[in-house]
Image (cartoon, rainbow, N blue to C red):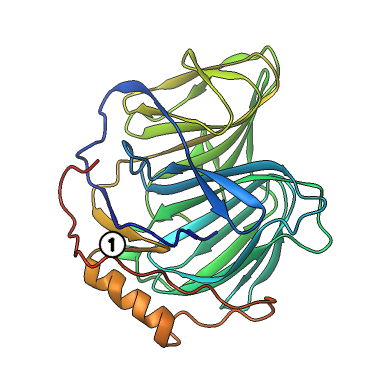
Amino acid sequence: MSNLDRQASVAVCGGRGFVVAEPVRELLSPRRVQLGESTEVRRLLPNLGRRMVGAWAFVDHYGPDDIADEPGMQVPPHPHMGLQTVSWLHDGEVLHRDSLGSLQTVRPRELGLMTSGRAISHSEESPRPHARFLHGAQLWVALPDAHREVSPHFQHHADLPVVTAPGLSATVILGALDGAVSPGTTYSPLVGADLSLAGGAETRLPLDPDFEYAVLAMSGEAEVDGVPVLPGSMLYLGCGRTELPLRAESDAGLMLLGGEPFEEEIVMWWNFIGRSHEKIEAARKDWMESTRFGEVTGYDGDRLPAPELPPVALKPRGRVR
């Protein structure tokens, strides 16, 4: 999914300046962003007070939206570099096309994982015809410097490992959880898991104390370490936890995101992650003027032009909010 903000700002992210080395309960409120004509997303990362969680650098939650009489998701061809995109659905379908020639429909609880590496472009749209409801999350993972120029590729995994406990079913999207390992390719120590809690469930989820974590609330009513989390909000949990108490008043859906704190400082603008303003500027120029990002074929519409890049050159630096 793209960042369609036509006034996209440059964000300096990463580094350990804001990593909390102990357990905390920091509730993050979303920023509402319009994505196309009929889809509004709730943007949780980057957030005013929290830019990353491990290597997770971008989190949008959308739906559930009734799109029976709407076009649904319509994201024109656009570029990415320096990151992985993770498409995750609870309802509906998304048709993925990219400049490698990939054509894949991603369905609920299936992993659509695109590694941009040095350069790729893709589009995402609701199929025609499509299901009535659309509900999911789109996430980005920042690639560490050693792998940011990796060859672009796309992976689709319909069968993912599941961890179970009384009242809990946890699908491992990326990384490892309680001994279960996702087949999705990762480039830094991290975890992403989809948690389904039955009404009345009360359980504890094992965690890695070296990771920092956050929980995105997708649906239902749940408490995370005693804090009520409403759908579309995210609770940042810090580091140092060996387990996470979970409780559900009703059936609830959550996403657990975590990873080793991302030590490198990165520059993120529009749909690019780089290491300097100059690299971001060059990527924008290449998208507008060259064939670096390839061509997406089959999408009925024009590709997305890049917005204007702010003139102030931001360099990676220490603590930012």
Q: Looking at the figure, which quarter contains the N terminus?
A: bottom right
Number of marks: 1
Residue identified by numbered label 1 = 145
Q: Is residue 184 visible?
A: no
Image position of 140 (left or right of 66): left
* Percent position of residue 32, x then y: 51, 43
Q: Looking at the figure, which quarter contains the C terminus?
A: top left
Instruction: Reply above or below: 249 against 206.
Output: above
Q: Is residue 91 visible?
A: yes
Closer to us: 302 or 83: 302
* Residue at x-position 33% and y-position 39%: 48
Image position of 177 (left or right of 70): left
Closer to us: 133 or 262: 133
Type of amino acid under label 1: Asp
* Percent position of residue 222, x then y: 59, 19
* Percent position of residue 308, x then y: 35, 70
* Residue at x-position 48% and y-position 12%: 226
Instruction: Reply above or below: 26 against 103.
Output: above
* Percent position of residue 75, x then y: 60, 64
Closer to us: 34 or 124: 34
Instruction: Determine the image quadrant of residue 249.
Output: top right
The secondary element bearing badge 1 is classed as helix
Instruction: Reply above or below: 208 against 318.
Output: above
Mark 1, Cα crowd under 10 Å, few <14 / some 14-19 / many 20+, is: some
